[in-house]
Amino acid sequence: MAELTKDGEAVDPTPSAALDAPVGRGEPILQVRNLVKHFPLTQGILFKKQIGAVKAVDGISFDLYQGETLGIVGESGCGKSTVAKLLMMLETATSGEVFYKGQDITKLSGKALKAVRRNIQMVFQDPYTSLDPRMTVGDIIGEPFEIHPEVAPKGDRRKKVQELLDVVGLNPEYIHRYPHQFSGGQRQRIGIARGLALNPEIIICDEPVSALDVSVQAQVINLMEKLQDEFNLSYIFIAHDLSIVRHISDRVGVMYLGKMAEIGTDVQIYDHPTHPYTQALLSAVPVPDPAAREGRERIILTGDVPSPANPPSGCRFRTRCWKAEEKCSIEVPLLAVPAPFVGKDTPAAHESACHFAEEKDVVHVH
Amino acid sequence: MTIIDKTADVPAPRGAGDHEGPLLEVRDLHVEFHTREGVAQAVNGVNYTVSAGETLAVLGESGSGKSVTAQAIMGILDMPPGRIPKGEVLFRGRDLLTMSPEERRKIRGSKIAMIFQDALSSLNPVLTVGYQLGEMFRVHQGLSKKEAKVKAIELMDRVKIPAAAARVNDYPHQFSGGMRQRIMIAMALALEPDLIIADEPTTALDVTVQAQVMDLLAELQREYNMGLILITHDLGVVADVADKIAVMYAGRIVETAPVHELYQRPAHPYTRGLLDSIPRLDQKGQELYAIKGLPPNLLKIPSGCAFNPRCPKAQDVCRTDVPVLHPVTEQDGGELPGRGSACHFWKETIHG
């Protein structure tokens, strides 16, 4: 396992140190360093000239540990889905590294990339559009085997697909049905079965339950937790429903406009948030308890998220922040444990990108 | 204010101005859709009332009939394939369903207005927002284009759209999601209606923007003393703003209750299941409670109680007899105003 510093320099560069070697629980399986994705804005038809860039992801770093669930939350347009696509290598990063078991996968291509891709799979948001309506369920779940034939030899595939259907709680006899014959929750199970087909180690879930009905959401969340224990999976769970993220995640990262604002364990983020954006986000979530209507402090942010093509200088949240001072427009706050909490044994001592980080409990009724 | 007003104790007056009692009363409303596969029974006997200044939340999953009920009230149901075989929608005592289209058009927009879920697809992309807002004044009040634009700017100010005068000639795509929803709200408010029906007004929005929009809606409702029907599936939003709740399942109201009571002591197993499936702090790492099975197919709703195949308490009687909305009482028979449950075993559910 290559040791990495925060800047992403490999101290002990031993790439491709046996991809199949198991990673112990609690060790990082995926390390993201200074990941950047800028989408160019061009002008002109014949002579394209770049006039700017949408800074969808602008330098984020985090680790994903073996067997854990890392939740990523943030408003639409903050770059969470772009992060998912970068980790899947569906988009090419502008700069930065993604280390999978010590190997930088952003530099890989051809066979080596294909081998890594087997281990990182994705479950998509909309089960209505992410399944091909003209393929049977058997073909959809079996398609990964066409690309990676080493996982299941040809004669074995049908049996494998039926096993997968069984694992996700669908009737194995449904193998010849088409997606339109299933409900939303069942379709999402098909999507999960497809994600599991190649025995991956990491599954990236981009809003896996937001298109589902409330009573069905719980079923799918339970299934995902069960599968995680069974197959020792690591999840990156992207969602905007904060209570579901809290339920499933071991650690949570809060993104704002292409940057990570705060990251920590679920208790650190939800009960001891120190970044003003996290505090505003948590306080805006409606609590399903009418008794909490009064006495709950709500921070209502004004305005909308600024355009990622032209983000504010310094701290990106400063245009909506009630604590903003001059310093915030000049200096970009770094994602680090805030100075007042360094070395202290408090849940507030976690990484937060704010010059004026302060603990504030916004979730509980006072 | 009771929620399930019995037909008998409703006063008779049918005049428009002197009507007392609830603003809107839906009585035994049925809606069905004729399709090639058969008749889909989307709404099967819904009763509810809304008074001025009151917020009724209609809670239900997709396919529960909550939006179809609203469309029937507004008179914007596609007919055919839709059909209203039975029922009354009384607005200030007058039945909307038997009115002439002209009379109805006068009420729609000026007395009852609707806010739709998806603002981008509800606004016309090739007309400026100012023109679309002004249409309300031009059509209903006969104002000139110029006057209507002035009114449109006032409205945009009213819903706190910054630089309204400069943005009145912008097109819908030039606004963010939250701003577009504000325009929808402005449009509904234009003629200061008595009743607003909001169909999932914040579902497409982020939580921070959702909080802004719900706040604005509540503020305007207080100011104009409007009745509000809020259609949603979000238990959090309901807890925040509703006065009373009607829970719908398979085209029926299965439970009605004032908001505090519903969350404290649900009297229907479906409501209980919904509340239990919200992730709670103390359940971290454990399995979430999940209602088993799927919502029913409206072409073949289960016999008896529609919830029986998914219900943990189901017994033989649930498979044969359709439960009526029983008034819910305390254990000692004390009255609980506004509460009702369509469950054969409501006593066990609330007190057990």
Image (cartoon, rainbow, N blue to C red):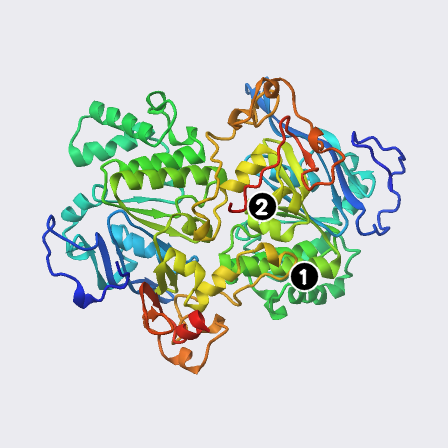
- Judging depth in this view, the residue of B233 and B329 nearest the camera is B329
Q: Residue at x 61, y 55 (%)?
A: A191
Q: Residue at x 80, y 56 (%)?
A: A150
Specify whether B159 is left or right of A254: left
Disc number placed over residue B110 in the picture, else none: none
- Judging depth in this view, the residue of A102 and B53 nearest the camera is B53
| Mark 1 residue element | helix
Quadrant occupied by the N terminus of chain A: top right
Q: Residue furthest bottom?
A: B316
Q: Residue at x 42, y 79 (%)?
A: B319
Image coords of residue A78 (percent x, y): 58, 34
Specify whether B17 is left or right of A359: left
- Judging depth in this view, the residue of B282 and B175 nearest the camera is B282
Image coords of residue B55 (percent x, y): 32, 50
Of the numbered discs 1 and 2, the one sitting upstream in the chain is: 1
Chain of the residue that carries numbered disc 2 in the rendered image: A
Disc 1 packing (10 Å; few <14; some 14–19; many ≥20): some
Q: Tell me the residue that label 1 is attached to.
A: A226
> Which of the 4 image quadrants contains residue A29?
top right
Q: Is disc 2 on the same chain as disc 1?
A: yes
Chain of the residue that carries numbered disc 1 in the rendered image: A
Q: Tell me the residue that label 2 is attached to.
A: A239
Q: Is residue A83 visible?
A: yes
| Mark 2 residue element | loop
Disc 2 packing (10 Å; few <14; some 14–19; many ≥20): many
Image coords of residue B39 (percent x, y): 34, 67
Say which amino acid is labelled 1. Lys
Classify A221 as above or below B165.
Answer: below
Image coords of residue B187 (percent x, y): 29, 36
- CA separation, marks 1 and 2? 19 Å
